[in-house]
Amino acid sequence: MIKLFVKHLSYGVAWGCFLFVLYVVLYDSFGIKSIPYFLDKPTVHAISFVVLGVGFVSSGIVYEIERLGFVLKLIIHIVVGIGVFMLVLLGNGWLSEASPSAIISNVIFNALILFAVWIVSYIRDKKEVREINKMITKKNSMKPLDTE
């Protein structure tokens, strides 16, 4: 279980770092200055993105708990992810100086990223299940038949 936790934690850190770089590149490329203080504190924002990645991605460990139904797992994942998101937003004051349109665009942007991360994870997991099923099928086809 610890190995699984470390795996999810490292995925969360990686996604947080990736999203920070993506955020900076997109905002810089399109000249969007809706959050003018963003580059004033790059370390704080980089750490915040890592926390967001850990909150969203690492909370996906809930899908490893077999006794919970899929809908409950999804609800837990979303509640934890959005809870971490709101704490980071409020803790950094990201909402205090932004215009309503900037807040809405940021929420939409982050919701799209959450959806993309969920889709990528879903596709990855489906692929992993297919590979495991192939290995099981192959292993079962190699077993000698019982002659009893």
Image (cartoon, rainbow, N blue to C red):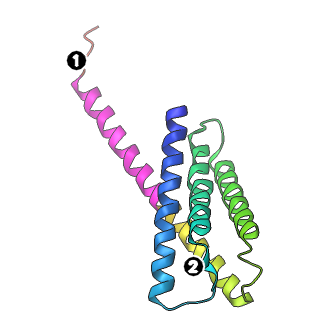
Q: Nearer the viewer, residue 112 or 83?
A: 83
Instruction: Identify the magenta region.
Output: 120-142
Please give the residue where the numbered disc 2 appears in the rendered image.
39
Q: Which one is closest to the eye, mark 2 or mark 1?
A: 2
Along the horizontal axis of the image, is 148 left or right of 36?
left
Q: Give coordinates of residue 86: x percent, y percent.
A: 73, 66
- Disc number for residue 4: none
User: In what quadrant of the picture does the C terminus appear?
Assistant: top left
User: In what quadrant of the picture does the N terminus appear?
Assistant: top right
* Number of numbered tags placed on the structure image: 2
Q: Is residue 133 magenta?
A: yes
Q: Give coordinates of residue 38: x percent, y percent.
A: 61, 78
Along the horizontal axis of the image, is 15 left or right of 60?
left
Packing grade of label 1 (10 A; few <14, some 14-19, many >=20) is few
Q: Amino acid at mark 2?
A: Leu
Along the horizontal axis of the image, is 103 left or right of 9?
right
The part of the image, by quadrant, that contains residue 136 is top left
Please give the residue where the numbered disc 1 appears in the rendered image.
144
- Picture residue at 36% right of the left edge, 38% below the top: 132
Packing grade of label 2 (10 A; few <14, some 14-19, many >=20) is few
